[in-house]
Amino acid sequence: MSSNDNIAKLKGAHEVIASFDFDVIPLDRGYAGRWLRVDVGSGEITINPVDDEMKRLWTGGKGFDLWMTFGEIDKDTKWDSPNNPICFSSGPLGGTTSFPGSGKTIATAISPLTHSIMDCNVGGYFGPFLKFAGFDSMMITGKADDDVIVFIDAVAGRVTLEKAPLESVDSHLIAEELAEMYADDELDLRNIACVSAGRGAEHTRMGILNFSFWDWRRGAPRLKQAGRGGIGTVFRNKKIKAVVLKNNQVTPAWKIEESKVAKMITPKKISIQCKGEIGELHEIIDRWNCDPEYVIEMMQDIQERFRHISRTAIDEINRKTGKPKAHLYHIATFYKTFSLEPKGETIIQVCMGTACHVRGSAKILDSFERVLGVGTGETTDDNNYTLEAVACLGACSIAPVVKIGEEVFGNVQSKDVEKLIKQAKGGGTKKKDAAVETTRTDAAKITPADLEKIAGQQKKKDGAFKKMLMVCTGTGCVAAKGFDIRDGLVSALKKKGVSSDYAVVATGCNGFCASGPIVVVQPDGVFYQKVKEKDLDEIVTSLENGETIERLLYKNPVSGEINEKMGDIPFFSKQQLIALRNKGLIDPENIDHYIARGGYDALRKVLGGMKQEDVIEEVIASGIRGRGGGGFPAGVKWKSGWKAAQEREEEIFVVCNADEGDPGAFMDRSIIETDPHSVIEGMLIGAFAVGSTEGYIYIRKEYPLAQTRLAKAIEQARAYGLLGDDILGSGFSFDIHVHRGAGAFVCGESSALMASMAGKPGEPRAKYVHSVEYGFRDKPTVLNNVETWANIPEIVAKGAKWFASIGTGDVSKNPWNGSSGTKVFSLVGDVRNTGLVEVPMGITLREIIENVGGGIPDGREFKAVQTGGPSGGCLPMAKLDMKVDFDSLTEAGSMMGSGGMIVMDDHTCMVDVARYFIDFLMDESCGKCTACREGLHLMSNILNRLCKGDGQAGDVERLEELCSTVQDTSLCQLGGSAPNPVMSTINYFREEYEEHIKENKCRAGVCKALIEYTISADNCTGCTLCFKNCPVDAITGEKKELHVIDSGKCIKCGICYEVCNFEAVEVI
Amino acid sequence: MAAERINITINGIEATVQKGSYLLQALRDNGVAVPTLCDHKDLTPSGTCRLCVVEVEQRGKKKLVTSCNFPVRGEIAVDTESERVKTHRRVLAEMYLGRWPNVPLIQEVAAICGATDKEKYRSELTDENPKACILCTHCVRACDEFIQERILDFAGRGIKRHLTMPFGEVDPHCIGCTSCAYVCPTGAIEIVDDMNHPVNPQKIRDFGMRINAEMASLDKDQCRMREVGTANIVDVMDAYDLLPVHNYKFGSHENTKYIDSKVLKAKYFTQDHPDGCWKGCSMACAKAVDGFELRTGPYKGDRVLVDGPEYETSAAGANMGCFDADFIVEWNFYCDTYGIDTISFGTCMAFVMEAFEAGVITTEHTGGKELKFGATDAVMECMHEIAAGKGFGVEVGQGIRYLKEKWVRELGADADFLQDIGMEVKGLEYSEYVCKESLAQQAGYTMAVKGPQHDEAWLIFMDMVNNQIPTFEDKANALYYYPLWRTWFGLHGLCKLIWNDVVPMSNKTFEPQVAAKVPEHVEDFFAFYEGMTGQPLDEEGMLAQSARVHNLQRVMTRMLGYGLRKDDMPPYRAVGPVTAEEYESRTERYDKQLEELVGFDTKGKTTEEKIKAVREYRMDQYNSVVDAAYDKRGWTRNGVPKIERLKELGIDMPRLIEIVKDDQE
């Protein structure tokens, strides 16, 4: 762009020689009925009629040009005679936009090459604009003394002839200069059409005319040429620099029938950003290289910075990336992260994940709404807070969870809400720095032999410490002040002057989240749980004394037995760790720790002489099936991708799906937070096997800690040359890029994920053509999830046989024949030992829930276990002895999914659970296909009315019908499996549905409309606690007397029930 | 290329279908109807309405698939009426009926699916509007596929999905092509193109969209105008020995691969982008190179936007022997910004190079530049000399006719030789096709009133590539019809490329001579005219419109002292081989023609003798075709419009008659 000053200078030098006003008239049947004549010599400007005879005989375009010329010249007119006219015409059909190719202009003059009539046809906007200004044709005749421009302003209705001494002559410059000079603003640039010739036209007989049009996508004028016969030479001979036409702003008159749902999304006030902010927007867009594949990333940064996506933001991204605005708007309204109206300074997110739901998150959300005085999704008037209900924060083991700003709070109760908000006001939301600097700064490209050296050095370093204190800093423990424990330990050691004897290591998730914060003393494996800051000095002292602190040890809640060592605790003892092999043992932010535990050995083995086919065969033989939910044998997928790439000679991508959207599951997050290199190494091996050089990790936006650790791990791997070119000197090259998801559950679906990676809304496509053949960028793409990739190095290191020997079935010949290896589950909900567990395939549900999980707490009864995420099913008591593997779960009407396992006690209403899942899925449906979009909405309507006591006869049958159609006819597996929660609950708990419809009864006491809170006279002691806590003053009663709830006032928030210490508040 | 066919079973009946075709189409081809709401004949399937589900049995496994986007790749048994299919179809239709009960199309399809209960799935989102958008995605696809604009899209997700433009505002960048309204089945979109206030905008739109639909589905397999613009012709011309190489000596070169459309697409042209030079053009052939870093001249080092290269630019490169895409793009840029015609300059430079190599001129005359074929740097030097207005480049810029005269006059050069190899007629340089083997194109070039530019008669493709005008009579007819048909576009502000750079499927059903006219497109353009003016148009009317202007131009040319038969005579290089080198490069072809067409025994003859024989034969042919064409045009043997022809056309004004009266026979 030329500078404004320059343009002003150019314009300032203009001198108007002649000026002529005209009316801009509408066209009729393609004709204006007049033509414009400009004599640049005399300055005479006239309008001449186009009569019916002229139309009848000469039609238009070239016919008009010639006829007008014929009237101007005689037999002695030469190319350089002043009366050699240059004529421009469109034609009666010109300027049409609903018929392709209607924008040509015909230019004519007597040619300096042929000395006879020359005609050229040329593209660009000049001809149509000339018509829209009300002229069928124009003629320029005469010869000017100095360089001039002819400016036809169809907005003002004026033609001027101006001396223009300073403009460039070369067309690419003058076209831009004049566009900027005459356009009102950036959008108006497209309304300027300019005819010019260049310096060369002055010195030859083959000069051309350049007809410009503004290419708004490229932000530059385009030039189309009237090339033949030297009309440009004539133009410059007349000393014309340019003919400029300024057209009226034309925006097509549009109407789209208004839809009911449009109102739900279209912002009431469209926000526009101020000039000063545009620079910042550009900075963000430039940071992502204006790459249209990264528009979602840009929008995330913009959302973070400006708390919303303004119209300006969309305009600027559009301009700089070329991505259509409509697509950007679709993205902005598709992904949950984005907001079209500014969000509050602090965002309060109440997790509505499954574990949180069964632990009462709906009530927590109600309380936030009440206390803040806004609805969910709204922002407080003072712009301080925006309240959001989010799908899952991935901290299910400490449900219910609330995130305020950057801080996560677990085990929240309704009564805590006010306190939490106050705390946030006090600046309690400041982001903690998670990092203790452990990255090696002297890293350089390593050789295979160096791996051993590094491992040895690290082991030696660790061995020099008397003990190592492994502090869990997984998300669960961090929510319970895990970082404070880590920092506290470091200072306690310093205080005692023993910091060189003991190492404090911040590990990823230990898994036993229910016991956080956790400190494990290694090498002995002493397990301290629920550690508080005040315990730290004592721990340090005990290290010196060689004692253990009994009160911090794990006590079995059933037997009362105390376990000193981690391995003795039942939660751990039943587990078999492959994917989680390094959990709690390494610092995830230090690659040397990973290497010391045998990390990258498998990669060395692969690069040390294995053939691609060997690696693929090994993975097939291991029988490992995709841990993301589908259970497709990973090796078979690799082979298809490899074949497709070979056959089509295409590049191939490997992708790691870390878009763990299943509410109730957080194993992928934990694996990355705990052991990111296991995923990177897995991807490296996969990439080698299929011949890929480029990999992508698509990670949920809601996992900032995982993102940080992943970024560090990638950086460290690159520093060692484990990513990049010529890895370990093998000639094999591979690198990994990270994409952040933006809040869409459906992006866990592979084709939707790939669409999202390409910078599009996450809409799946039909899989009749597999994405392994035509995936990301339509190239072969091998996609596996985090857990699958994390297993790969172990499979390669220990062999397929070893892996296949774990689990069910015989997978050695056919990977579909059973389920090999282990599976990580997030064991959450109404179970004592919530956390992350890895167990061999084929273990029973009962073993997981009762032995590993320690059974149901608070003396309640087991009711159901939900597996497979929102599209999974609820299995009743009768299924507890079922083996847990891919096929058994599917057979029972549920599925493996990514491994969420939510235990539900008898306080759980199964109709409400079904409603919860369907509402979740309805919200997450992309809306592309009718079955899922309409079907889930209708199912949600029915389920919600059941929960409100408005059930109708036939509702269960209608649900069954909808389930069947949605299941069978949905485009993707989100819809295909969405009915599972409804079908499985109808199947196993039909009587609860019937009760809701016929008796208006919710036996679990969950459905608000069907229950009432009362206070039992037998148990009430008149302690006044409920009275004090009731937020709506619905409770009355004197001290030491029976309290009473006014059911008219009661909002059923449940706080009285929560706070009563005497079980006097009852639900009926 | 015959498509592979496979056997499938449809509702128990055997059928064969084209392998890889979509099942819905295969079913329709076999007379089996399946209801659908989102399918559109001109758009790629979206598979969103789900109504077209059918049950497919493959390798013993039954599954439901949406037939619209299910490719038939193996043997299958299809059941379109199983209970399962019928139930789902009904339930889906009930969902539609619950949401949009008053949309006629929904009612119609629901009735087919056995769904009648409007109340069953009524909800708070039920929309009573009979013109409601039903999310069929036609418009979104048409905006993308017809016109590549992507102005329209959905917003929101899940049940909140709705059609909109950003923020519910009209996007000012919408070009108003109206494709969306054309494909909308419910009338939810209203937009009319009425800048011209046509009599019948709907008619214009309907016929325009017929072409847009072809562009969306056929261009990628035909000319690939959207991908590479006219540059696609480089590859074709080289393959047919018609690409000018070394001043039109030859028609192909082994190095064409360095400048062909594949290279331009892979390394230069921006892809996936609407590149029309006017709004609403679905052909969008105005390709451009973005961010090209210049290596020479005053803008050296600048990153610039280059329009093109088009076919002529690359071909002119070949003509100069410069098979270097970087050079072509740079040269293209400077020609444009300096305002120099790539064609005249390229052809003139090719002539200069041949003259240089033949020793007519030396470095003494060129300012020290070794202007041999392929001298890319020297060509760029000449370009910059033109801009500066000094040096040999300026002379090149005066054109071939000027140089011929000067060299004969000042250097005593062989005038006949220069006349033979200087590719100009009337003073205008030839554009970039080798027309030696195409009599139609030879005459098309030379008889063009303004000079040898193919926009008046681009017959080479139909003559040489498509072989649609094989006989002498066909060619003579073509020299009457096509210049007038092509003139017609120039009368109306239209681009000719739309006419036959994409051809509709119907074209296969016509005889070659008829197919060359692309009858369906002629119908489209006539309908366009009628929609605009309200006046019907037929071939006769079209020819009359054009002939008036064509004859006016010829008469004006005559007035200026030209426009006679002598002005329509080609340099021999345009007709046949001038040099032994040229003859011997295609000996087999020329010998064969001499034997078969002339009856000339080539045995024992020298190349010079053979060249002479070819020349006699070809010039005779040329003169015959000119005679025939003049006749058809109503011109005298000397190429002047007859007065009766002017009368017939109603343009026998005294001033015109005065000009031609002395030339009448």
Image: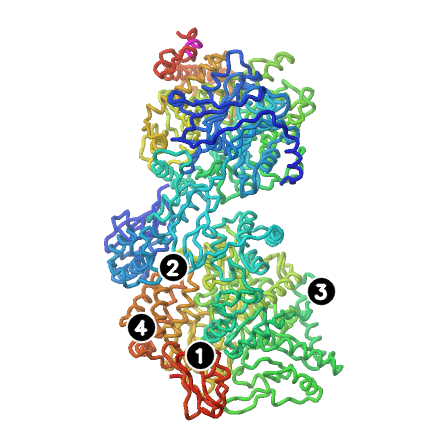
Looking at the rendered structure, the secondary structure element under dot 2 is: loop
Residue at mark 2 to residue at mark 4: CA–CA distance: 30 Å
Residue at mark 3 to residue at mark 2: CA–CA distance: 50 Å
With B502 as the anchor, is A322 left or right in this view?
A: right
Residue at mark 4 to residue at mark 3: CA–CA distance: 66 Å
Using the image, tell me which numbered label, if any, was put on residue A903.
1
Lower position in the chain sequence, tag 1 or tag 2: 1
Q: Do marks 4 and 3 share a chain?
A: yes
Q: Are marks 1 and 2 in contact (CB under 8 Å)?
A: no
Lower position in the chain sequence, tag 2 or tag 4: 4
Q: Main secondary structure of the magenta part?
A: helix
Query: What segment is highlighted magenta in the picture?
Result: B656-660
Name the foreground residue: B504 vs B194: B194
Badge 3: how crowded within 10 Å, few (<14), some, or many (20+)?
Answer: few
Tell me if residue A848 can be seen.
no
Residue B165 among those drawn in magenta:
no
Q: Do marks 3 and 1 share a chain?
A: yes
With A798 as the anchor, is A32 left or right in this view?
A: left
Relative height, residue B531 to residue B154 (above, below) = above
Q: Chain of mark 2?
A: A
Badge 2: how crowded within 10 Å, few (<14), some, or many (20+)?
Answer: many
Q: Which residue is mark 4?
A: A951
Q: Whole-percent x and y of residue B10?
A: 26, 54
Q: Which residue is mark 3?
A: A441
* Quarter of the figure with the N terminus of chain A: top right
Using the image, tell me which numbered label, if any, was put on residue A455.
none
With A76 as the anchor, is A763 left or right in this view?
A: left
Residue B658 among those drawn in magenta:
yes
Picture quadrant of residue A477: bottom right
Q: Which residue is mark 2?
A: A971
Looking at the rendered structure, the secondary structure element under dot 3 is: loop
Q: Chain of mark 4?
A: A
